[in-house]
């Protein structure tokens, strides 16, 4: 009963007010980006596994509530996002969600943002706790970056909350460069960005094209 009350109060608060801060990162893809081939230990990545991955998200939603958001899923279906699953001995142990040259619903911003034809946006990477610390994040990220480059994507963006130090290290180790810190605030219907996402993306593109 107490937990239900807390959830309802939290839902009411979010309907009136929302605030968050995150760092934006960008990577320019080149032919020299790393590639991990198949792994004999039972690991494999499935590229065309959207429906199974969504079912997995739903089944794990109670334990990890942030991995499934109905508006995010609706946007992913509409714009044909890539939901790659990482499997170990045929069981899903992680995933990565990617929007390519379309629009992406960012939960933190409660809205879609548009992507250019040569842009992709990674908006969620997850590995089950029992499998962390084994460089599996690098494994799945290297593979998808190689695929995106082959498909004609040049710029890959992501935004990572300030508290998520592990993800920040992972993406920086993979060659992503920090562009900006963005603060989002909504009070009733008033929305404020300390730096607009479209401007941040242009800053990221210039960071690499001006080198």
Image (cartoon, grey):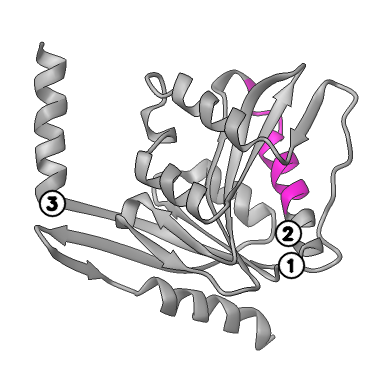
Q: Position of residue 175 (x, y in %)?
A: 68, 61
Q: Is residue 75 above or below residue 36?
A: below
Q: Mark 2 — residue?
A: 148
| The image quarter in which residue 112 lies | bottom left
Query: Which residue, given by chain and number where applicable, does mark 3 sit on?
Result: 17
Look at the image and give the residue range highlighted in magenta: 131-144
**What separation in Å lies between label 3 and label 1 (alpha carbons)?**
37 Å
Callouts 3 and 1 close, C-beta under 8 Å = no
Res 29 label: 1
Q: Badge 2: how crowded within 10 Å, few (<14), some, or many (20+)?
A: some
Q: In this picture, is 196 found above or below 173?
A: below
Residue 102 in the figure: left or right of residue 113: right
Q: Does the magenta stretch include residue 134?
A: yes
**Residue 207: % across, % down:** 60, 80
Distance of label 3 from label 2 (alpha carbons): 36 Å
Q: Is residue 10 left or right of residue 168?
A: left
- Label 1: state its secondary structure: loop
**Residue 33 on image: x %, y %:** 81, 60
Quarter of the image where the C terminus is located: bottom right
Q: Position of residue 130 (x, y in %)?
A: 59, 18
Q: For numbered disc 3, what is the local secondary structure?
A: strand
Identified at 50% across, 49% down, the residue is: 76
Mark 3 or mark 1: which comes first in sequence? 3
């Amino acid at each position: 009963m107490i937990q239900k009350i807390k959830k309802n109060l939290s839902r009411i608060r979010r309907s009136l007010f929302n605030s968050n801060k995150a760092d934006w990162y960008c990577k320019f893809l080149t032919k020299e980006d790393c590639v991990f081939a198949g792994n004999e230990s039972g690991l494999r990545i499935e590229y065309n596994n959207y429906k199974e991955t969504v079912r997995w998200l739903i089944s794990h939603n109670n334990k990890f509530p942030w991995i499934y958001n109905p508006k995010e899923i609706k946007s992913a279906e509409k714009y044909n996002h890539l939901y790659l699953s990482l499997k170990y001995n045929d069981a899903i142990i992680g995933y990565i969600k990617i929007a390519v040259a379309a629009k992406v619903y960012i939960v933190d911003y409660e809205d879609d943002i548009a992507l250019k034809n040569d842009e992709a946006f990674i908006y969620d990477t997850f590995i089950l706790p029992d499998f962390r610390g084994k460089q599996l994040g690098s494994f799945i990220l290297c593979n998808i970056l190689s695929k995106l480059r082959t498909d004609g994507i040049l710029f890959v963006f992501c935004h990572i909350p300030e508290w998520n130090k592990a993800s920040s290290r992972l993406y920086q180790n993979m060659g992503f460069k920090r562009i900006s810190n963005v603060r989002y605030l909504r009070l009733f219907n008033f929305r404020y960005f300390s730096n607009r996402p479209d401007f941040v993306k242009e800053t990221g593109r210039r960071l690499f094209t001006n080198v």
